Image (cartoon, rainbow, N blue to C red):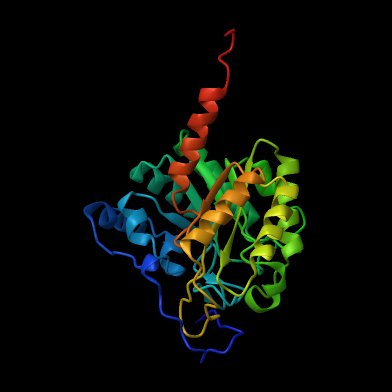
Amino acid sequence: MSRSPSTADSGAQALPKPPWLRVHVRETPEMLSTRAILRRRKLGTVCEEAACPNLHECWSQRHATVMVLGTVCTRACAFCNVATGLPDRVDPHEPAQLAEAIAELGLRHVVITSVDRDDLADGGASHFVSCIEAIRARCADTTIEILTPDFRHKDGAIERVAAARPDVYNHNVETVPRLYRRIRPGASFDHSVDLLRRVKRCEPSTFTKSGLMVGLGEEPDEVFAVMDALRAADVDFLTIGQYLRPTPRHAPVARYVDPAEFASYRDAALARGFLLVSSSPLTRSSYHADADFQQLRAARAATTPTPGAI
């Protein structure tokens, strides 16, 4: 087992971090309580495995992105800090443990992701379905967001998960097509976009979501082209955040994107018709996912006519 290697020169000179990327780490009773519950339920989180800079903030708000199907990935992307190697055995009790942890944390909205499981016949699709069903049975009022792998070459996997009708189906394209061979080997930009298109065709009422990192060497026009491709697939939500190099063995940061440029990306995405856009240096796939989704639901409820109203 090892951490994901980089295809880039690991000896490249690291850029100094700008002031807007400074994160103030502070342990709170709520953060420690969240960690204790997750440990007791033997649940992993992408917050820890991917070294997310927002961990303390999110856990203090009792929000965590749970990572099911183990903590070892069968792929080795140049941006990701998750360990790669021989994956863990699937725990059949994990869906029930996940549902109990959500009940204990009192979550209104939960985000569930996983490592790539190319070793499994369905890529882990049936396990996602089991998790959704367990949560619905135990926590009927909790909205469910899933962030899945691409399930490449696994017939019917995408449709099986979509049919379980999560409230939000997220799959990240991660970067622009030109950088895939270096940053996301083993994946395909076109396949990722098609996955999101197929989810929307299967379940039109399910919100679809995707995200990408900037600062890897992409050009703004390429980011705008990704937005266009996602909107052509009827993707509803978009996240854009700064790539941060987890270790010297990973792909280097090409540049730190100014907050003003993130604001311009947000404006461009909203102009293209995305319903929700989070674009900032510290944005990650599930950053503020709870608050953003609840805000959207409230706004929609406020504009939906009451039956019988004039």
Asked whether residue 236 appears in the rendered view, the answer is: no
Who is closer to the viewer here, 41 or 237? 237
The image shows residue 169 at horizontal and vertical percentages of 61, 48
- Position of 284 with respect to 38 (left or right) is right
Residue at coordinates 68% horizontally, 75% vertically from top-left? 185
User: In the visual, does 202 lie left or right of 208?
Assistant: right
Q: Quadrant of the C terminus?
A: top right
Query: Could you tell whether 109 is left or right of 30 in the image?
Result: right
Q: Which residue lies furthest to the bottom in this view?
A: 11
Q: Is residue 36 something that shows in the picture?
A: yes
x, y (%) of residue 94?
Answer: 48, 55
Q: Eyeballing the image, is 142 above or below 145?
A: above
From the viewer's perspective, is 39 left or right of 224? left
Number of callouts in the render?
Answer: 0
> Which residue is drawn at the image coordinates 52% and 75% (left, top)?
255
x, y (%) of residue 73?
57, 71
The relative height of residue 205 versus residue 267 in the rendered view (above or below) is above
Question: What's the residue at 76%, 62% (across, down)?
Answer: 190
Q: Position of residue 247 (x, y in %)?
A: 46, 81
Q: In the figure, 141 relative to 17: above or below?
A: above
